[in-house]
Image (cartoon, coloured by chain):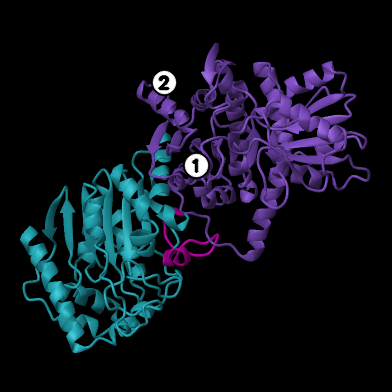
Amino acid sequence: MRKVLMGNHAAAVGVKLARTDVVSAYPITPQTQIIEMLNDLGESGQFTGRFIKVESEHSAMAACLGSATVGARSFTATSSQGLAYMHEMLHWVSGARLPIVMVDVNRAMGAPWILWTDQTDSLSQRDTGWMQFYCSSNQEILDSVLMAYRVAEQVLIPAMVVYDGFTLSHTYEPVDVPDQKLVDEFLPKLENAYALRPDTAEAFSALPSPKEYYRLKARLDHDMTRALGVFEEAGKRFEEIFGRRYRLIEPYRCEDADTILVVSGAPASTAQAAVDDLRKQGCRAGLLKMRAFRPFPAEALRDFVRPGTRLAVVDRNYSQGHHGIFCEEIKSALFPLKSRPEVYGFIAGLGGGDITPELLKEIWKEADEGRADASTANWMEDAR
Amino acid sequence: MTIKTSIPESELLSAGHLACQGCGATLAMRYALKGLGKETVLVTPACCWTILAGPAPRLSVGVPLLHCPFATAAATASGLKAGLVAKGDEKTQVVVWAGDGGTFDIGLQALSGAADRNEDILYVCYDNEAYMNTGIQRSGGTPQKAWTMTTQGKGGSERPKKDLDSILEAHHIPYIATVTPGYPEDMVRKFKKARGIKGFRFIRVLSPCPPGWKHDSSDTVDLSKLAVQTGSFALYEIEDGAFRLSMKTPKRKAVGEYLKRQGRFRHLTEKDIVEMQEVVDAAWKRYESRS
C-alpha cells in the first residue's frame, strides 16, 4: 500500500512490520516521532511489542541487552548526544553478539547545542562493532529496518539504520508499505539458539581468558566481514519479494565518468540531480552512493574504481585534524591497489547546512579540475 | 539433637565459588537463592559477584546469570523481564544482584527509572559499604567515620551513609526489606515473600566483608548479628508504604560492641563512638515512631 510518510514514521512502520518484541527508548530530537508513533500503535493495538519508556539512552540500550539476551527481537532509536551516551552499551551488545536494530537519526554533536543533521554522531561509533547502513529516502528507511533485522539475525551482530535529521526524518515522501505477509516471508521469527533459557544455569558475558577474548573478537571481525555477503543475499531476496534492490554501494551514471561524487545519506539523492545537471552541461560526472559503512565494502570499492577516475568524497562529518570519515575509509580501502585513483575529500553541510545541487556541482568541479587539495580535507561552505 | 529450621535444604550455590574467606555476600547469595528457588534469572553489574560467579564457562550458582555494565543492572533486568514476557514466560523471576557501588552510586539512575516504572523485578543490593571489588574505596553506602582507601584521613569517611531505602520508598514501590545473613530465617522468609509480590521490589542485604571491614573471617556472622543487636542495622519491611520492624530490640547493645570488632573503625575515639551511638538512637526513634 502506498502511503505518504515522514522518515521517522517510515522507520516506526518498519519496526511494527518486523513484529519487534521489545522497544526501549528515550526521547531526543529529531528521533522522537519514531517512539511516539510506536507508542500510539501500541495503544491502539496495532503494535503488540512491549514498550519500555526508560529514563535514559544508556538504559534504553541496557534494556535491549536484557531483552535480546532472552531472544526477543529488540529495537531502540536515538540521535546525537543520546547515541554518544549509549557508547559503552554499543560495545557491550556487539561483544555479546545480540542482533539488536537501532535507528540513529543523524544530528550534529554539541557543544554548542545544535539540532540539525550531520553524521559525526553515528560515525563516531565506528569501532563499537555495529553494522551501519545509511539511507537516502524514506522508502529506504522502512526497507532498511527490515534488511537490518535480517542481516543482524543471520550474523548475530547489531545493526544501526542511519538517516539525516529533518532532511529525511521530518520530510514526507511516498512510501510503499509492504504487506505483512510478505514481510513475514522475508523476516522469519527470531530463533536465537544462543539465547538465555531460564531453565539452564549458564552465565552470559562472564570473564574469559585473554586467548578466548582474542578469539571472540576475531570471530566478530570475521562475521562482520561475512555480513557483506549476507547483505547482498538479503538484497537479492528483498528484490524477489518486494521488487526493490539494495546494494552495499550504488553507482549512478559512472560508466564513462571522469570524476565521481561519493556521497551517503540524503545528499546522495540530491547528488543524482547534480550529476544529471553536469551531464547536461557535457561534463562526464557520476555518483557513487555509499550505503554500508560497517561492514565497509572495501572489496566492492576496489573492484569499482578505475585509476584514471577521480573520486570527490563528500563528508557531512569529520575527524578533527584529519579528514572526513568516509574519505579516510575510502582511502584506506584503496591503498592496496597498485594504481589508485585520485581521492579528494570535502567537508560540507555540518550542523545541518544545506548540501545543494549547486554546492555538489562546485565540489565536483573542484575535484574534476584538480583544484582541490588531495592531501587534506577541503572545507566547502555553501556561499548561497 | 536436630534443630528443624524453616530454611530449605536445597542448595543453588555451589561450593566452588571464588569468594574470600568469610564473605558475607556469598552467605547472602546462598540464603537469597534458598528463598527464591529455581525459575530465577540473575542480572549482575560490575561488583564482587562478577568474579564470584566464576570465569567463563563456569558458574557458581544454579540459575542463569547475565553480566551487565556497571550502571545498567535495573535497566538490563527491565529489558530481560520484558523479553521473557514477550516470549510468553510470565513466571520466571528476574533478580538484580548488585553491590552498593552499583546501587547507591553509578546505578542509581537506572534503579530509579525501573522503580518509577514499577517494573516486575526484584532488585537486591548486597551492601558491603564500599567498592570492595576494586580494593575498598568509599561509596555512598560507606558509613560515617569508616576507613576506606579513599577516606584514609584521620576521621575516616566524612559524610553519613546515604539513606537509600528512603529514596526507594519515595518511588511508591510495593515492597522494601532489609536483611543480613546473620538472620538466615528472616532472610529466606523475606526473599520468598518478595518473590510472591508483583511489581518492583527492593531488598538490601548488609554483607560483612572481612578484607574491607578489616575483621577476622570467622567474625562475619557475629558482626552481621551485632549490626542488628546494636541497632546499627535495622531489620524491617515496608509493604505498600507500611513500615514494620522485623525484630524489636528494646535493649540494644552498645554500638561500640559492633564498631570495635572492625579494623575500619580502629581510629575511632570514645567521643566518636558516643556520637555514633547518638546517630543510631535518633534513627531508632524514627523507626519506633513509624512502627
Counting other residues with Cα less than 10 Å from the Cα at mark 2, is it few (<14), some (14-19), or many (20 or more)?
A: few
Vertical relation: B177 (above or below) A290 = below
Please tell me in which quadrant of the rendered image residue B156 appears: bottom left
Q: CA distance from mark 1 to mark 2?
A: 22 Å
- Residue at point 40% right, 73% down? B137
Q: How many marks overall?
A: 2
**Mark 1 lies on residue:** A68
The crowding category of the residue bearing disc 1, from other C-alpha atoms within 10 Å (few below 14, some 14 to 19, many at least 20), is: many
What colour denotes chain A?
purple
Counting residues from the start of the chain, the first of labels 1 and 2 encountered is 2
Chain B's shade in the image? Answer: cyan
- Which mark is in front, 1 or 2? 2
Residue, disc 2: A46
Residue A82 x/y as whole percent:
49, 43
Query: How far across and down, in percent of the image, does residue B45 sit?
Result: 43, 58
Q: Residue at x 40, y 53 (%)?
A: B73
Q: Amino acid at mark 1?
A: Ala
Compare residues A189 and B231 and report the one nearer the observer. B231
* Chain letter of disc 2 in the image: A
Q: Is residue B43 above or below residue A298?
A: below
Quadrant where the N terminus of chain B sits is bottom left
Residue B185 or residue B145, whichever sits in front: B145
Query: Is B141 situated above or below A182?
Result: below
Residue A86 seen from this side: no
Left or right, A110 with reference to A327: left
Q: Nearer the viewer, residue B22 or A93?
A: A93
Residue A157 screen position, x and y as percent: 61, 42
Q: Is residue A334 left or right of residue B10?
A: right
